[in-house]
Amino acid sequence: MYINIGWLYPDLMNTYGDRGNIIALSYRAKIMGIEPTVNKISINEPADLISKMDIIFMGGAQDKQQEIVNKDLKIKGVYLKKAINDGVPGLYVCGAYQFLGKYYKEANGNIIDGIGVFDLYTESPGPDVPRCIGNIVIESKLFPKIKLVGFENHGGRTYFANKKQAFATVINGYGNNGEDKTEGFFYKNSFGTYLHGPILPKNPELADYLIKKAVEHKMINNVGVGRDRPIKLKRIDNTWENKARDFVISKL
């Protein structure tokens, strides 16, 4: 079994070291007995390459880089939106998360359109309002027995009406907007989140979830085998990862 991991705009959307998410996905997939191939997809790669991916990842960046990506997403966004709607699992952090919404409203009122696959919008509160920065602890119904940790650093505030679509509830930190205790967004098999850190090495359960969903999606769509056929993946001992996470939580 093999999986194709699509890393969108690694040369532009990788400001906060979130390449660690790609490292974690590749490493854990190999331990599970799956051969991963990382495909770097930036502005010079064909848009339809996205449709061949089994997992998609996209990180965050500064304003200049995001302007370049936003223009390119007018083409690639069609394929990305279809992949997400088709159930291809993915992780979208910070700026990438905002791109998947309806729009980003800058402090001067300028509207930057997103691809609209997530039913949300983001607004900049302006330079006089402090950024949402710091360690964050969250709880998610997808992983009911654990707390997840990360580091957030964002100025934009993200809002949506249906709070059931939130990825998690904030225990310590700001989350989407610092107001409603929501963090991130979950749609089909895709996660939008403000958690850097990077999030997957700190929370291996999420990495394993994405890998398992990728295998399930690949089997159903490419092999013709349904969910009634059990997927046997090698279990990974997360003792040290859990100790590291518990240490972070104890400090908060």
Image (cartoon, rainbow, N blue to C red):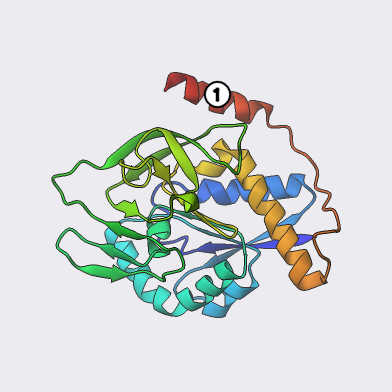
Q: Nearer the viewer, residue 127 or 123?
A: 123
Residue extending farthest to the top is 250
Q: Residue, x 43% and y 45% (percent of image)?
A: 183
Give the residue at mark 1.
Answer: 246
Image position of 165 (left or right of 33): left
Q: Position of residue 221 (x, y in %)?
A: 74, 71
Query: Looking at the image, is 99 positioned above or below residue 140?
Result: below
Q: Residue at x 15, y 49 (%)?
A: 127
Whether residue 192 can be seen here: no
Q: Give whichever of 43, 115 is nearer the camera.
A: 115
Q: Is residue 158 above or below residue 179?
A: below
Residue at disc 1, secondary structure: helix
The answer to whether residue 40 shows anywhere in this view is yes
Indicate the quadrant containing the N terminus: top left, top right, bottom left or bottom right: bottom right
Which residue corresponds to the image point at 82% horizontal and 70% vertical from the top-left?
A: 223
Number of callouts = 1
Picture coordinates of residue 189, whole percent (x, y)? 60, 58
Crowding at label 1, few (<14), some or many (≥20) Cα neighbours within 10 Å?
A: some
Front position in the image: 60 or 45: 60
Residue 173, quarter of picture = top left
Q: Give the side of residue 168 with respect to residue 102, left or right.
A: right
- Quadrant in which the C terminus is drawn: top left
For the view shown, which residue lies furthest in the right direction?
229
- 140 to the left or right of 38: left
Give the image location of residue 11, x and y in percent. 44, 61
Kind of residue indicated by mark 1: Asp
Image location (x, y in percent) of residue 184: 44, 49
